[in-house]
Image (cartoon, grey):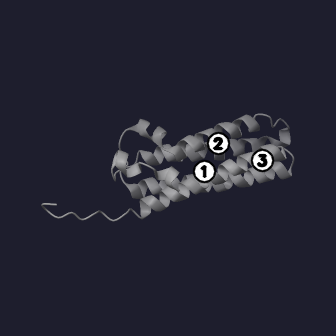
Amino acid sequence: MSIAVEGWRASWGSGSGFGVADFKKLLVWQKAHTLALNVHRVAKRIRKSYDLSLRSQLVRSAFSIPTNIVEGRRQRTDKEFARFLRIALNSGCELEYHLIAGRDTTAISETDSDELIRQTIEVRRMLHGLILKLENPPPKSLTTAGT
C-alpha cells in the first residue's frame, strides 16, 4: 500500500487542510480519476433506454471516488480526510457491483467489465491503505536534547 501513501506526511505534515491543488499529487486520486474517465468512456456506449439508469449509476459512482478524495483532502484533520476516503471506498464497492450488473445484463462487454473491475479493486486497495495509514499514524520519534 505504500504507493497510496508515499510521501503523505513528508510532503504535507499531519494536517491535510493545505492547498487544493495538492490532491493531484496523490497517486490514489490519479488512479481514481483515470478509472472515472474509463468508466465514462464505456458508459457512453450504453444506448438502450432500459439501460440508461445503469449508465447513470456507473458514471455517478465512478466520479464519486475521486470527488470524495478531493473533498477529503481539503479537510483540516486526518480523521476528517479518512471519513471522506471511506465514502470514496464505499463508492468503489458500489461501482464494482454496477460493473458486474452491466456485464451480466450484457450492457457492458465482459472485457470492459473485467478491466474496469480490476482498476476499481486497485483503487479500493489504495484507499484502504491510505485510510489505515491516516487512522494509525506511526509513533512520533523521540529525540533527546543534544543528540
Q: Which residue is mark 1?
A: 123
Tell me which residue sits at (65%, 54%) in the image: 121
Q: Can you say whether 141 is above or below 52 in the image?
A: below
Badge 3: residue crowd in 10 Å (few <14, some 14–19, many ≥20): many
Badge 2: residue crowd in 10 Å (few <14, some 14–19, many ≥20): many
Q: Which residue is mark 2?
A: 35
Residue 55 location (% of width, % of height)? 75, 41
Q: Amino acid at mark 3?
A: Ser
- Under circle 1, the secondary element is helix
Q: Amino acid at mark 2?
A: Leu
Q: Is residue 81 left or right of residue 143?
A: right
Answer with mark 1 or mark 3, whichever residue precedes in sequence: 3
Answer with mark 2 or mark 1, whichever residue precedes in sequence: 2
Q: Quadrant of the C terminus?
A: bottom left
Evaluate if marks 2 and 1 touch, with contact meaning CB atoms under 8 Å apart.
Answer: yes
Rendering quarter of residue 18:
top left
